[in-house]
Amino acid sequence: MRYHSIDPQLFINNRKRFAEKLPSGALAIFNSNDIMPTNGDGTMSFRQNNDIFYLSGADQEETVLLLSPDSFHEKYREVLFVIETNDHIARWEGEKLTKERATELTGIKTVYWLSELESVLQTVMSEAKEVFLNDNEHYRRANEVETRDARFRRWIGEKYPLHTYRRAAPIMHELRAIKSPIEIELLRKAAEIDVEGFKRVMKFVKPGVMEYEIEAEFLHHFIRNRSRGFAYTPIIASGGNACVLHYIENNQACKDGDLLLMDVGADYANYNSDITRTIPVNGKFTSRQKEVYNAVLRVMKESLDMLRPGNQLHEYHREVGKLMTSELLGLGLLDKTDVKNENPDWPAYKKYFMHGTSHYIGLDVHDVGSWTVKMEAGNAFTCEPGIYIPEENIGIRIEDDVVITEDGLINLTEGAPKEVDEIEDWMNS
Ligand SMILES: [Mn+2]
């Protein structure tokens, strides 16, 4: 791995918190992600499954985690199965986890080769009162590919058809929504890499530069700082491209007088940042650009104030909608009749601000977490209002990543210039 080793206490604590949520006598099994194919003998780079990573820190394919906290056999209470390695494999494929190294990284004492899984299962399944298996239950999942967890569910269901199987995902979502101090440091690291990337790029942008050249600047900075790379496909959108919300072509020249919207995240140790800044290509906002920009910025500041323990995401989004409505009235983009006649399911402001303001962030960029419970300390969110006016060639979004604490927000990304003056000064210094 490119990142510095993580304190295994993170994973030890996570397993403890997970075990506390399991009913007595239960067994839980988590699978790694597969290495995804491309064509021929090509593969994509490996990205670990977030749940097995969260519970073990094992960042390798063909890995299985078995947790049976109440097992009579102490050595089976936490077991990690990894793919067998030897000198031949090490020479061809590079270093894989040895049993000793796996224990160091994960804090799990019992590490077996994957080939021993079936026989260990034989023992623990005979004890288990019920079995928790995993699935991707993200509310926005869109996945046609069968995961290793899915194949495993089919396999174990055929081999042990009369056991009671239950969902691990609700427990994982609940746990992962609350970030511990070690996780906050990892998020901070991802954010720092990203912030420095933005500062570098703000000095690089000038009329005529291509959007993909800017993308390359970010990637250069990220990888030099132990990031695997982008947290998601970056959006580098100049002029009217910024009004296409998921513009990822990044193949146009940045024009004098246009704005440039950059929504770019860095990965660090599987944790993510998600920052957006909108800057003038030539280093100076026009008065109209500044007017719209400051409207977005005011909505952002007031929204950040509402990210606090006790508030609730749906209500928060409704309140942000009201703030945005008043700004759009001020900008002359909406009038009172638009607002009076608005459809409550699609309020008038959505014409210019059609996406959500905040999402959980963590091991997933759009991290798991409930939208119906109240916010609490340890939740990490983005805050990303925007105004998009295609007819004026203006698309503005500003996005920070924050962690909620009992005594206010930690803004992980405030180092990236955000005030109009700050941006202009930085670009021109
Ligand atoms: Mn975001």
Image (cartoon, helix red, strand yellow):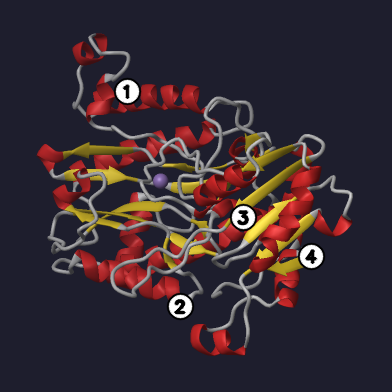
On the image, the x and y values in percent for residue 18 come to 73, 44
Q: Which residue is mark 3?
A: 52
- Give how far apart the Cα atoms at labels 3 and 1 are: 45 Å
- Give how far apart the Cα atoms at labels 3 and 4 are: 16 Å
Q: Is residue 378 visible?
A: no
Q: Residues within 10 Å of mark 3 (few under 14, many from 20)?
A: many
Q: Which residue is mark 4?
A: 110
**Which of pointers 3 and 1 lies earlier in the amino acid sequence?**
3
Q: Is residue 263 visible?
A: yes
The three-letter amino acid code for the residue at tag 2 is: Arg
Kindly identify which numbered label has been placed on residue 326.
Answer: 1
Residue 384 to residue 212: above or below: above
Residue that appears at 56% across and 51% down: 152
> Can you tell which of label 4 and label 1 is closer to the viewer?
4
Q: Secondary structure at mark 3?
A: helix
Quarter of the figure with residue 251 = bottom left
Residue that appears at 45% across and 37% down: 358
Residue that appears at 56% across and 58% down: 32
Q: Given contact means CB atoms under 8 Å apart, are the residues at marks 3 and 2 in contact?
A: no
Kindly identify which numbered label has been placed on residue 224.
Answer: 2
**Which of pointers 4 and 1 lies earlier in the amino acid sequence?**
4
> Can you tell which of label 3 and label 2 is closer to the viewer?
3
Q: Is residue 338 left or right of residue 53?
A: left
Q: Given contact means CB atoms under 8 Å apart, are the residues at marks 3 and 1 in contact?
A: no
